[in-house]
Image (spheres, helix red, strand yellow):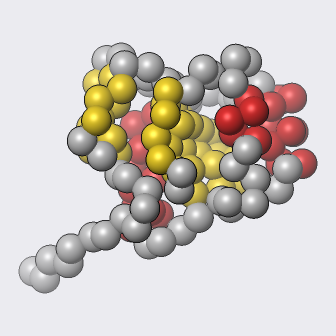
Amino acid sequence: MRLNEVTYNDAKPIEGYGPGFFRIGGEVFHSAVLTGPEGTQAWGGYDADPQALLALAGQIDVLFVGTGAEVAHIPADLRTQLEEAGLGVEAMSSPAAARTYNVLLSEGRRIALAMLPV
């Protein structure tokens, strides 16, 4: 078996998660998070902080949205705003979103991830 070291450029990978927390790039967050090319920050969620997501337009191609422990729809008006801003949006459970984000990040893709805690 051949092992290759994965590099993540400027963005940081999701290293772990559990009930109410995420570990990203060695830092623990006890809230919803937004991570991508500009770093990682606490995120207020769908209703409280849509501008943080819209600010990613032009910087990324796809925004993954982790909806918590189970897959759920994001609010339709938020999805419409994001898509009109030119962002692809993929909603999935937070564990699946974290795994997908890490794989595509290792490939150098232009992505970001907004996640609700599990």
In the rendered image, residue 74, in percent from the top left (x then y), is placed at 70, 29
Q: Is residue 27 above or below residue 46?
A: below
Say which residue appears at 70% left-offset and 17% top-offset.
48
From the viewer's perspective, is 36 left or right of 10?
right
Residue at 42 percent across and 44 percent down: it is: 98
Q: Is residue 96 visible?
A: no
Of residues 93 and 19, the one nearer the viewer is 19
Q: Is residue 82 visible?
A: yes
Q: Quadrant of the N terminus?
A: bottom left
Asked if residue 34 lies left or right of residue 103, the reply is right
Q: Quadrant of residue 55?
A: top right
Label count reads 0
- Percent x, y of residue 40: 46, 40
Query: Which residue appears at 54% of the width and 51% of the height?
Result: 38
Extreme residue toward the bottom, this view: 2
Single out the residue that lies furthest toward the left. 1
Image quadrant where one finds the C terminus: top left
Q: Position of residue 13 (x, y in %)?
A: 35, 52
Q: Position of residue 53 (x, y in %)?
A: 69, 39
Q: Would you say 11 lies left or right of 56 here?
A: left
Nearer-the-camera pick, 78 or 58: 58
Residue shown at 27%/70% (left/top)?
Answer: 6
